[in-house]
Image (cartoon, rainbow, N blue to C red):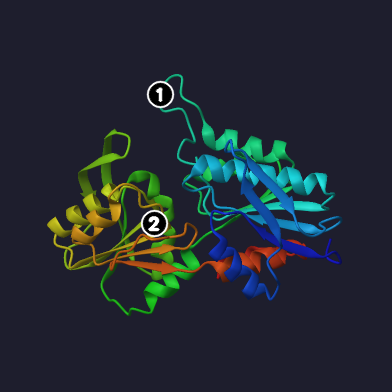
C-alpha cells in the first residue's frame, strides 16, 4: 500500500476542510461528480480512475445528516465498484453518535447502526475525531483510527497566557475528556452535576470543585443548543469564577445556539472546523482548523505508520 497512489475526495458536507487537507498534503482534491436526481436521489460518479488506489473520502455527517450520510455511503459503493484498492472514510464529525446506548425501552442505537452501514457499503477503514462516547470505537468491525482535537485546541488556548486556570467538565460523562485537557494545561479539575429533564435541555444541580477566582475552561465534545455550556458557565460564575471559556471539538450550533451564546457570560467558544460554519456567525466563536491533524493522519495511514505521535502532540 505504501507504494500505491492515494487520492482524497470530498463529499458536499465540508469541502472547505477537504481543500485545506489537500493543500496541506500538497495534492489535488480528487474529481467527483455529486448531484441530485429530480426525485431527490443522490448520484455519484468519479471523474478520474481510482483502480488500485488508496481512496480517502472526507464527509462530516452533520446537518443535513441523512443526505450527507447517504452521499458518503454511495461514494463508498461507487469507489468499491471502480476497483479502489482501499477505501477509508474520513469523518471529522460522526453524526448519530449521541444515540450510543439505550436510555429507554424500544430506542435504537444509531451510532452502531451507522458503523454497520459504513462497513456494509464497502469501506475498509474509518478515520474520525472526538466521538461522543469512547464506547463507539467498539462498534466498528473494520479498521478504525480515532483522533483528538485536544492538541490543536490546547495549543491555541495556551497562547492566551491566562493564569489561574481550572478545567470544568459540564457533566459527569465529560469527566474523562476534561481530565485529559486538565493534564495538558496543568490545571485542576471541577465537575458539574447535571440533570437532563428532556432531550436538548439540561439543568445544573451542583458544582464539584473550587472555581472561585479562577478562569474556567469548560470542555465538551460539541456545542449543540448551547444550553449545557451556558448553564455550566453561569454556575461557575455564581461560584466566584473570574471568566469562562469553552473548548468544544464540534460546533453543531442548532436552533438559536449562537444567539444564546452571544447573550451569555461566556468569554469565548473555541471549536474546530469539523463542521462548516457556513453563514452562521458569532463574535464569541473561534474556529481552529484540524486540517494538519487529519493531513498527518492520512499520510501515516497511507504509509502504514503509527498514529501514536500525532495523538501525543
60 or 313, nearer to the observer: 60
CA gap between label 1 and label 2 equals 27 Å
The disc, 1 or 2, on the residue closer to the chain's N-terminal end is 1
The quarter of the picture where the C terminus appears is: bottom right
The secondary structure type at the circle numbered 1 is loop
Q: Residue at x 70, y 57 (%)?
A: 32
> Does residue 264 show up?
no
Is 140 above or below relative to 26? above
In the image as oriented, which residue stretches furthest toward the top? 106
Mark whose residue sits in front, 1 or 2: 1
Residue 251: quarter of image: bottom left
56 or 2, nearer to the observer: 56
22 or 127, nearer to the observer: 22
214 or 300, nearer to the observer: 300
- Check contact, mark 1 vs mark 2: CB within 8 A: no
Query: Badge 2: few (under 14), some or many (20 or more) residues near its Cα, within 10 Å?
Result: many
Q: Is residue 31 shown left or right of residue 150?
A: right
Query: Badge 1: few (under 14), some or many (20 or more) residues near its Cα, within 10 Å?
Result: few
Position in image of residue 234 (x %, y %): 18, 55
Position in image of residue 213 (x %, y %): 17, 68
Position in image of residue 74 (x %, y %): 68, 43
Mark 1 = which residue? Answer: 104
Position in image of residue 174 (x %, y %): 39, 49
Residue 15: quarter of image: bottom right
> Does residue 136 show up?
yes
Residue 111: quarter of image: top right
Mark 2 = which residue? Answer: 178
Q: Residue at x 83, y 53 (%)?
A: 85
The quarter of the picture where the N terminus appears is: bottom right
Amino acid at each position: 500500500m505504501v507504494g500505491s497512489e492515494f487520492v482524497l475526495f470530498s463529499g458536499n458536507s465540508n469541502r472547505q476542510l477537504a481543500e485545506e487537507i489537500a493543500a496541506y498534503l500538497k495534492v489535488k482534491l480528487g474529481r467527483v461528480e455529486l448531484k441530485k436526481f429530480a426525485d431527490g436521489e443522490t448520484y455519484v460518479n468519479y471523474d478520474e480512475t481510482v483502480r488500485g488506489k488508496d481512496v480517502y473520502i472526507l464527509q462530516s455527517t452533520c446537518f443535513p445528516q441523512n443526505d450527507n450520510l447517504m452521499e458518503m455511503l454511495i461514494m463508498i459503493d461507487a469507489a468499491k465498484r471502480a476497483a479502489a484498492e482501499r477505501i477509508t472514510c474520513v469523518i471529522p464529525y460522526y453524526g448519530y453518535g449521541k444515540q450510543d446506548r439505550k436510555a429507554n425501552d424500544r430506542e435504537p442505537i444509531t451510532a452502531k447502526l451507522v458503523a454497520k452501514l459504513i462497513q456494509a457499503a464497502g469501506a475498509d477503514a474509518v478515520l474520525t475525531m472526538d466521538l461522543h462516547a469512547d464506547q463507539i470505537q467498539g462498534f466498528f468491525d473494520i479498521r478504525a483510527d480515532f483522533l483528538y482535537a485536544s492538541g490543536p485546541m490546547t495549543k491555541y488556548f495556551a497562547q492566551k497566557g491566562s493564569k489561574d486556570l481550572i478545567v470544568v467538565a459540564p457533566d459527569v460523562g465529560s469527566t474523562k475528556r476534561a481530565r485529559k485537557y486538565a493534564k495538558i494545561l496543568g490545571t485542576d479539575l471541577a465537575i458539574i452535576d447535571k440533570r437532563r429533564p428532556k432531550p436538548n435541555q439540561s439543568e445544573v444541580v451542583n458544582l464539584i470543585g473550587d472555581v472561585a477566582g479562577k478562569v474556567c475552561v469548560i470542555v465538551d465534545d460539541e456545542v449543540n443548543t448551547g444550553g449545557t455550556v451556558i448553564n455550566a458557565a453561569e454556575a461557575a460564575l455564581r461560584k466566584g469564577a473570574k471568566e469562562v471559556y469553552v473548548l468544544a471539538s464540534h460546533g453543531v450550533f442548532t436552533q438559536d445556539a449562537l444567539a444564546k451564546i452571544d447573550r451569555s457570560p461566556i468569554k469565548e467558544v473555541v471549536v474546530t472546523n469539523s463542521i462548516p460554519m457556513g453563514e452562521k456567525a458569532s463574535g464569541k466563536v473561534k474556529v481552529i482548523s484540524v486540517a494538519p491533524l487529519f493531513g498527518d493522519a492520512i499520510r501515516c495511514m497511507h504509509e502504514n505508520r503509527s498514529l501514536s505521535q500525532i495523538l501525543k502532540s
